[in-house]
Image (tube, helix red, strand yellow):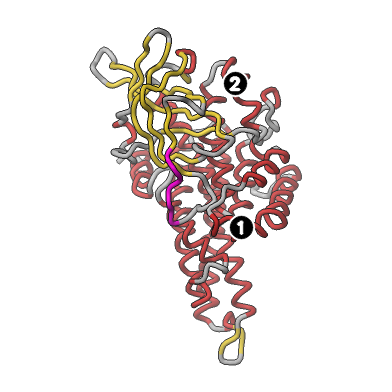
Amino acid sequence: MDYRLDDEHEALRKTVEEFARDVVAPQAERLDADEEFPYDIVRQMGDMGLFGLPFPEEYGGMGGDYFALCLALEELARVDSSVAITLEAAVSLGAMPIYRFGTEEQKRAWLPDLLAGRTLGAFGLTEPGGGTDAGATRTTAKLVDGQWVINGTKCFITNSGTDITRLVTVTAVTGESEGGKREISSIIVPTPNEGLNVAPKYSKVGWHASDTRELSFSDCHVPAENLLGERGRGYAGFLSILDEGRIAISALATGLAQACLDESVKYAKERTAFGQPIGKNQAIAFKIADMEVRTHTARLAWYRAAERMMRGEPFKKEAAIAKLHSSEIAVTNAREATQIHGGYGFMNEYPVARHWRDSKILEIGEGTSEVQRMLIARELGL
């Protein structure tokens, strides 16, 4: 088993690293403070082909793989998690469901602009009354005269209210099966839409430059052909999308953990106390050593999950392990980095303060840590 990057992947990683350092980093503090969506950065990422990395060229993609996307996410998250999650959600939740489950007509209609970063897509799964229990969907869609009529509310939806958002795919109850079980389907809702109300941005602890909103549907009409995938298979299909997305979130979390490590090493060499750099103190040196161990193992975890996915092997357990471990060590590294920086770590002018605020959501989004443990236990036959 060889985990060294080949020339193509290393070239991509280096390109994104330079872009993150030279373009994203100088704007990160301001974007965070102003809670401003990074339209110009999104445009440049589109020009670089980052939104199309794991998609075939016939739809406007780069013909790469999911591993390439994850490499880009890790490098972006080393600088700004808001930018990283904007890319991750646009690809994994916006474009990927259409590529995986869409008709040829739907792919031709939506993917070229999504993969170029000219437009963004979102996925409405979570509802106010059910986060982890996403199967308890209350949003409904009834087929009336060739139109889906959608009613309900979705919350915490990333990329759903930007100026370039053009679709939101929602899960909705579309009927009942013969056994009385609720039928949940996925439907593409073009935006803007007369029956769709997009709420103002949430006031969040972190990810300030990322767009996150509540959506409410009131007799929202869309054509019957906007059904995505097989009727009644919407929830099941999205679960498979989540498995892939957990690898991407793991890569993003690893990038944040690496950023905290990098900043801590730099600060420990520069900051002096009692006549020497604080990194000479064993208490600080050991903290940083542990941060390196955690980051190293998190990277190996998402590499392994991505490897199995690309080989076509079962990867649900490996994705859950990677997501669980990397998200939790990201929070730990952010906390330790803040402690190493002392009072300066509590000041927003230092990147570790932003990383600390951005880290917590990683233990919640795309399946909480508790859900990951449940999935791992199930895969072990428990």
Count of numbered labels shown in the rendering: 2
Q: Predominant secondary structure in magenta?
A: loop
Residues tagged 2 and 1 counted as in contact (Cβ below 8 A): no
Residue 1, image x and y in percent? 62, 46
Q: Quadrant of the C terminus?
A: top left
Quickly name the residue at label 1.
28
The answer to which image quadrant residue 317 occupies is: top left
For the view shown, which residue lies furthest in the left direction? 180
- Asked whether 15 or 381 is in front, the reply is 15
Whether residue 170 is situated above or below residue 19 in the rendered picture = above
Residue 107, labelled with which disc? 2
Callout 1 crowding tier (Cα within 10 Å): few <14, some 14–19, many ≥20:
many
Residue at 44% across / 43% down in the picture?
A: 200
Identify the secondary structure beneath mark 2.
helix
The answer to which image quadrant residue 248 occupies is: top right
Kind of residue sitting beneath label 1 = Ala
- Earlier in the chain: of badge 2 and badge 1, it is 1
Disc 2/disc 1 C-alpha distance (Å): 34 Å
Q: Is residue 78 visible?
A: no
Residue stretch in magenta: 199-205
Residue 177, image x and y in percent? 29, 15
